[in-house]
Image: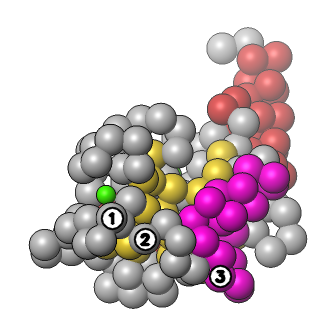
Amino acid sequence: MSFCGRQSHFVRRLKTDSVCGQCPPGWKWFQNGCYYFSEATQNWLVARSWCLNKGAQLVIVNTKEEQNRITSRVYWLGMTDQNVEQEWYWVDGSPVKLSFWSTGEPNDYRGEDCGTIAIDGRWNDISCHMTDYWICEKLCPSEFRMTV
Ligand SMILES: [Ca+2]
Ligand SMILES: [Ca+2]
Ligand SMILES: [Ca+2]
């Protein structure tokens, strides 16, 4: 590798730290992104809009590590089955594959279409009109992402 190649790699590492290591005030860095844990409660749609307005989205659980990181109280997850019942999709349009549903969930009790994570990390579908805390996730630009 040429010196220039090495130097650009070094610069990229610095950017990784500055971009992903210093999240906006009130946001926490974890792996490939910045996370916002709300202090207020809203219904799912308002929470989703709040994240979008910050250039983020409601959290999408991609890994067990991420799941563990966000487990601490009841939060909205960025997933819904409101388009087709029992077909769960993340807010980025990808189907929910890795999942941590609680026993007997999702049960669509009286038409529950939005996903939450409970204090024990188990998922439950509840009415989208309920209010809960929420988590936004903002990915670092791809060129800055750490390999984990
Ligand atoms: Ca994620
Ligand atoms: Ca449902
Ligand atoms: Ca349920």
Q: Quadrant of residue 3?
A: top right
Q: For the residue marked with disc 3, what is the amino acid?
A: Thr
Q: Which mark is residue 111?
A: 1
Q: Amino acid at mark 1?
A: Gly
- The answer to whether residue 10 is seen in the rendering is no
As drawn, is 97 to the left or to the right of 17?
left
Measured in 3D between alpha carbons, the distance from the residue under mark 3 to the one under mark 2, in whole angstroms, is 14 Å
Q: Is residue 143 left or right of residue 117?
A: right
Residue at (80% x, 25% y) in the render: 8
Between discs 3 and 1, the one toward the N terminus: 3
**Dot label at residue 127:** 2
Asked if the beta carbon under badge 1 is closer than 8 A to the nearest atom of ligand 2, the reply is yes
Q: Is the Cβ of the residue at disc 1 closer than 8 Å to that at disc 2?
A: yes
Kindly indicate whether the residue at mark 2 contacts the one at mark 3 (C-beta within 8 angstroms).
Answer: no
Residue 93: % across, % down? 47, 35
Kindly identify which residue carries mark 3. Answer: 41
- The quadrant of the picture occupied by the N terminus is top right
Could you tell me which secondary element the residue under label 2 belongs to? loop
Q: CA distance from mark 1 to mark 2?
A: 7 Å
- The spot of residue 142 in percent (x, y) is 66, 32
